[in-house]
Image (tube, helix red, strand yellow):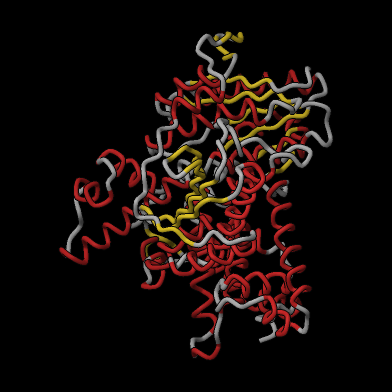
Amino acid sequence: MAAEAGDASACRQLVEAFLPAIAGIARAYDRGGGVERTELIQEGVAGLLFAVRRYDACLGTPFWAYASFWVRKAMQELVAELTRPVALSDRAVRSLAQIRAARRDHQQAHGGEPTIEELGRATGLTPSQVESLLAIEQTPRGIEEPLRGDDEATGTLADTIADPIAEHEYDDVLSGIEVEEVRVLADRLDDRERTVLSAHYGLGQSAQTLTQIGAALGLTAERARQIESTALAKLRAGLAEPALQPLESRGS
Amino acid sequence: MSDALRHNAYVYDSTEEYIERSVAFLREGLGAGDGAVVANTRPGLAAMREALGIDAARVTFVDVSAAYTRPARTLASYHAVYVNELRSVGSLRAVADVQLGPEPGEWDEWVGYEAVFNRAFEHLPAWVMCSYDANRLPDRMLEGVWQTHTEVLTDDRLTDSDRFESPAELLRGITGSPEPLPGLRSIPVGRTLESFREELARALVAEGVPEAKALDMLLAGTEIADNAVRYGGGVEDVRVGRDRGRFVCEVVDRGSGFDDPTAGYLPPRGGIAKGLWVARQLTWRIEFFHSSRGYTARTWL
């Protein structure tokens, strides 16, 4: 698929083709206020493009069946972020992950919901900490609040969130929050720089010597070393002078 | 306005009070030609935008709902915003609404962040007014207001704080002694930074650290090891492992160490002090301490 390979024109066509379906999903999240429909659709498109990069046609899953999960997930994250009553620190995110894991373990072992005290014992947090953390998980929208399509009820928010994969993937979001900054950082490297760094240090593959890496790229070992050195310097410079984040908007 | 930082605060009881104080503060600055920044979550930004009316067009609104993750990242985010603003104006005023999670264990760290702010931004011609919501923030944070701001706005006037502490002094007070981590294991030190990275990379892969996070640790570890070589007489020992789920790397050097709890929190200026700033940006926490092995930098990923 051309879009998989990053072909901009193919990506545009793909987005146009799936825009009605993305808008349909956005309608389901568009009922409680607080998040604008255009923002939901933008996030949905980002989810679609993310799915394109990860989709493996060889597995036989229809593309939309796969991509719709990422579209929903992107919208879920936006809704959670924009309707969450307080910002979550790194430590809070990690503690929440511990609580979720403890809850899952308890359910598997005992078949029922753990008490606050049991969660506290399992995680090393005090009961009041557990309560506070669980409280901030609750967004203003009720999990069983009915969602409505154009003309009729279409289930509950829980139905939308709780597909079997989503339960698992939502847990993964926790570590995703932490690696987000790095993913942006690594994006500053070009393909060859990423290849050299990953191959040399065995990130996602077996580690190789610079001689082996150079040979694979048709370069000398010294040239591979220079590429690595440039990549490290580029990452360092990016962090030492942080890029201005698009957090800002002037006026309305 | 002077060309040095003014870092003040006020505590408010209602949205109306927040709006009234913040708008008056910013309008005074706008009248004097200062730039203006409002940092808050989206509801607060919307309320301020409406209250500022036509003046909103001259104000930069910053959504900080995701900015309060770790003090080092928060400092970097605000620094980038203010430096960017100061590219177009000679001085600025900002109202920054303090955001916090519910965990008591982290409140001291955020009081420490407010203290470090005084040092980290001291070179900027900015008047930053931190706003604290009395109904939402814990008592510890509200007490910290007087420890971390030289002046606090009360009853429409700035009151000198007699409880203000120097950032270094305050940080020392809230930083406990790091506990021993006997579960860590030594790995070969390596003769060069490159071989140090190779050994560290093996350990990261063996511990199952995800690729992107491993790259973080490699970059941070390089900075720490480079510091040890440049200023600490060389690397004596490197210990790695996991503790409470996090990957930990200790670099022990041969030097006498340093005593500056703000190290790595001050944005690099003129190419100086980049290394520890970079390392703090990439990792969860870095502790510096003397141990029986030598002066130790312990990095938590």
Nearest the camera: A105 or B53?
A: A105
Residue A155: where, in percent of width, then height? 37, 66
Q: Is residue B251 visible?
A: yes
Q: Residue at x 50, y 49 (%)?
A: B299
Vertical comparison of A69 with B140: above or below: below
Question: Farthest residue toward the left?
Answer: A110
Q: Is residue A250 left or right of residue B291?
A: right
Q: Is B20 situated left or right of B273 in this image?
A: left
| Picture quadrant of residue B77 | top right
Measuring from the top left, give residue B289's x and y in whole percent.
48, 38
Residue B195 point in image, percent of width and height: 61, 64
**To which quarter of the image does residue A50 belong?**
bottom right
Question: Looking at the image, how many numbered discs can be counted on the residues?
Answer: 0
> In this rendering, is residue A57 above or below A241?
below
User: Which is nearer the eye, B25 or B91?
Assistant: B91
Nearer to the camera, B273 or A67: B273
- Of the pair B19 and B201, the residue shown nearer to us: B201
Q: Residue at x 73, y 39 (%)?
A: B272
Q: Is residue A33 visible?
A: no
Residue displayed at 76% across by 42% down: B271
For the N terminus of chain B, the quadrant is top right
Q: Position of residue B295 (x, y in %)?
A: 51, 41
Location of residue B167 with respect to A220 vertically, above or below: above
Give the residue displayed 49% in from the left and 90% down from the top: A60
